[in-house]
C-alpha cells in the first residue's frame, strides 16, 4: 500500500539585505558585504560531518590530513555541529559583514559547544549576540 501524503507548512526565512548595483543588469539585486567567516566554518563542518557519516572519509583525522590542518584545528571546527539547531540557523543566516572584523569568531563559540544542554547553549549564545551587536554599532 503506497499512499501519497502532502504536508504543507509555512516556513519563514530571514531576508538578506540587498542593494541594487547600478552597473548590474536592470532589476538585478546584488548583496553587499561578505559572508561571516563563522558561517562559512559552520557550513564546512556540516558538510564534513556528512562525509564522515556517509563513509566517504574514514574519520576527522583523515579530513585534517586532506585539508592540511592540524587535528586540533579540525576538532575545533567540527565542534560547531554540536550547537543547537536554532543557533546553527542564526549563524548560517547571520548578517553580512559590511566592513571591519567579524563580530562573532570561532573563539566565541567554542565554550558554547562544550555545553550539552541546549538551554545553556542558548543563554551563552544570547550573551555572544549581545556583545556582537555592540561591536556592529
Image (cartoon, grey):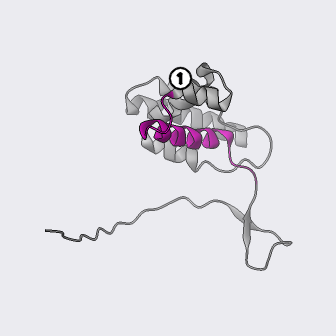
Q: Nearer the viewer, residue 107 or 134?
A: 107
Query: Could you classify mark 1 by the number of other residues whose Cα lies within 10 Å: few (under 14), some (14-19), or many (20 or more)?
Result: few
Residue at the far bottom: name it. 26
Determine whether 69 is above or below 89 in the image: above
Image: magenta residue range: 33-59
Position of 119 with respect to 135 (left or right) is left
| Residue 135 visible at all | yes
Q: Nearer the viewer, residue 35 or 127?
A: 35
Q: Which residue is located at x 65 percent, y 37 percent?
A: 132
- Image coordinates of residue 109 in percent, x first then y, are 57, 29
Q: Which residue is located at x 18 percent, y 69 percent?
A: 2
- Image coordinates of residue 83 in percent, x first then y, are 46, 35
- Image coordinates of residue 81 in percent, x first then y, are 48, 35
- Image coordinates of residue 84 in percent, x first then y, are 43, 38
| Residue 109 visible at all | no
Determine whether 128 is above or below 40 in the image: above
Q: Which residue is located at x 61 percent, y 48 percent?
A: 94
Position of 16 with respect to 54 (left or right) is right
Q: In terms of secondary structure, where does tag 1 sit?
A: helix
Q: Which of 110 and 57 is in front in this view?
A: 57
Position of 72 with respect to 118 (left or right) is right
Determine whether 119 is above or below 18 in the image: above
Asked if the magenta segment contains residue 118, the reply would be no
Q: Which residue is located at x 61 percent, y 43 percent?
A: 39
Q: What is the quadrant of residue 137 in the picture?
A: top right
Asked if the magenta segment contains residue 48, the reply would be yes
Q: How many labels does the image show?
A: 1
In the picture of the structure, the residue carrying the numbered disc 1 is 111
Amino acid at each position: 500500500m503506497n499512499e501519497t501524503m502532502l504536508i504543507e507548512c509555512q516556513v519563514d526565512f530571514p531576508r538578506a539585505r540587498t542593494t541594487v548595483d547600478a552597473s548590474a543588469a536592470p532589476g538585478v539585486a546584488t548583496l553587499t558585504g561578505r559572508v561571516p567567516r563563522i558561517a562559512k566554518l559552520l557550513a564546512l563542518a556540516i558538510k564534513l560531518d556528512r562525509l564522515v557519516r556517509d563513509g566517504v572519509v574514514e574519520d576527522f583525522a583523515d579530513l585534517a590530513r586532506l585539508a592540511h590542518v592540524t587535528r586540533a584545528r579540525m576538532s575545533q571546527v567540527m565542534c560547531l555541529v554540536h550547537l543547537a539547531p536554532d543557533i546553527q540557523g542564526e549563524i548560517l543566516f547571520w548578517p553580512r559583514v559590511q566592513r571591519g572584523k567579524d563580530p562573532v569568531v570561532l573563539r566565541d563559540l567554542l565554550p558554547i559547544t562544550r555545553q550539552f544542554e541546549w538551554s545553556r547553549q542558548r543563554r551563552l549564545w544570547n550573551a555572544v549576540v549581545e556583545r556582537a551587536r555592540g561591536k556592529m554599532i
